[in-house]
Image (tube, helix red, strand yellow):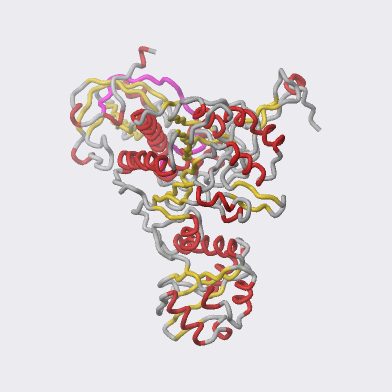
Amino acid sequence: MAKYKRTHMCGELSISNLNEEISLTGWVQKSRDLGGLLFLDLRDRTGILQVVFNKDKDSELFEYAQKIRGEYVISVSGIVGKRDEKAINKKMKTGYIELLANNVKIISKAETPPIYIEDDLNASENLRLKYRYLDLRRPAMQNIFFVRHNVNKLIRGYFDRKSFIEVETPVLTKTTPEGARDYLVPSRVQPGKFFALPQSPQLFKQILMVSGFDKYFQIVKCFRDEDLRADRQPEFTQLDMEMSFVESDDVMEIIEGLMKEIFKSIKEVEITLPLPRLTYKEAMNRYGSDKPDVRFNLELKDLGDLLSNSEFKVFSDAIKNGGSIKAINAEGCGTKLSRKEIDSLGEFVKTYRAKGLAWINFTEEGIKSPIAKFLKEQEMKSIVERMNAKTGDIIFIVADNSRTVYDSLGQLRLELGKKYNLIDKTKIGLLWVTEFPLLDYDENEKRYVAIHHPFTSPMDEDINLLDSEPLNVRAKAYDIVLNGYELGGGSIRIHDSELQEKMFNLLGFSKEEAWRKFGFLLEAFKYGTPPHGGLAIGIDRLIMLLTDTDNIRDVIAFPKTQSASCLMTDAPSLADERQLAELKIKLD
């Protein structure tokens, strides 16, 4: 290997290296043969440098270099020279210099690649994933992974300075109900039994608090057998942390400090602390979402008190049935939207279970609205005042059960924000959402379910509501939100055995069932449990937002497709009969 030893990296060279004799290795980006001069662009992970072969100086070397094609791997040496004034490329970091070659060796030849190694790539994602090793050669992709490396380095340094200890937790573990479907791994030595790949290290990190570690963190792989989307993968990486003898503010303060360091280092942005906080109730009422994008206005306003007695039954019936009437004012959008586009927005909200979308357009000619004839003059006047509407605005209204109203208008808000460039992308919309409901009610299973997990602690002042009004109990839970994405979430955990037992009862677990599923944790809790809490942040999602991509597959070196398959390795694949026999598994 010594014969291929390089002295420098391509992108690290500058005018300060003039007249130095150097050796480089890398891939050939492209070549240009001008007859007596041959130019190669040599690329490595740091950048590109132009290499020049002169036929008059060494015809044998020139002829050998003419054999080199795109993506050949070569070793080249020579003298760093200054480019001719007319040939300077100010767009390139190395655009003032070139390498005057005096030796070159082809290390490895390459066939014509099925995708171009360039940032403005027009290839399908499936083709990129099949030839991922080529896709990863592109500078834009490599930059993402440099960011990822630096973020991981920052995380470890930050938590080390805060006296946390990194502890690895098992990958082969017990299947426990944590909200998603487990990936199961059959045991060969115990036929018929299965390990599960962890959805998170939740139970282990709580046991580490019982073990007295006090402050734990880990950058860890997690696995969930879920239906996929653009920002979700079956295996993902998260920052996991837990602390003893803390309340919510202590955990949030630690994470805020980390976010400040990351944004300053990676984005050169100063974040003001403490971060803004919204309660879950405030977030839903104002934005229709528990992960609001606060970089633009277009907030929801409540019209229920104005229209509860309206003769328009769609409105009055919604309130009578315990639902809501809410609206958003798309300021200035009334003149931009055609009737066809308004109708398409009506179809859009139907995908979020809304029965329809009422609208009032304030044009130069006056109010245009299909519902105007159903509203009294005072009702219309009250809506205009509440929504602060003026000429050029258009108000959208949804009346339905509250969940549908929040979902449909919250998504419509985002759709309008993207469609009409209302989102200020220079802003960092980083905030906390707190005081989530502890429980929800599953109509299919006819039982309460934990919104976070069964070990989340209720707010102290709401504990007395567990017996009488469980759906009104707030949790000591908190999510950190960035630009409309849930970046991470956590909670203070239950450490009192009586309260934990009550929680299991509410969730429909018998004592025997709770011990069967969580027995190892409950056993540990019998021997002195400190109050504790923590949080997990999705590293993949954080990198996605830091690098301004909207596809989580871009920030994972070897991701899965939406059908949870790897096009490069053709995984998952069939197991052969011998493997299945060893595992005592028969396929139907």
Q: Position of residue 454 (x, y in %)?
A: 60, 41
Residue at point 51%, 48% (across, down)? 459
Residue 178 in the image: above or below residue 345 = above
In this rendering, does residue 29 appear at all? no
In this rendering, does residue 374 appear at all? yes
Work out whether residue 333 or residue 395 is closer to the camera in this orientation and state it. 395
Magenta segment range?
99-120
Residue 309 in the image: above or below residue 459 = below
Q: Position of residue 511 (x, y in %)?
A: 70, 37
Residue at point 30%, 31% (across, down)? 11
Quadrant where the image shows the N terminus: top left
Q: Position of residue 51 (x, y in %)?
A: 30, 29
Residue 420 in the image: above or below residue 123 = below
For the view shown, which residue lies furthest in the top direction? 2
Work out whether residue 291 or residue 432 is closer to the camera in this orientation and state it. 432
Residue at point 42%, 30% (across, down)? 69
- Dividing the picture into quadrants, the one containing residue 390 is bottom left
Magenta stretch contains residue 114: yes
Work out whether residue 455 or residue 173 is closer to the camera in this orientation and state it. 455
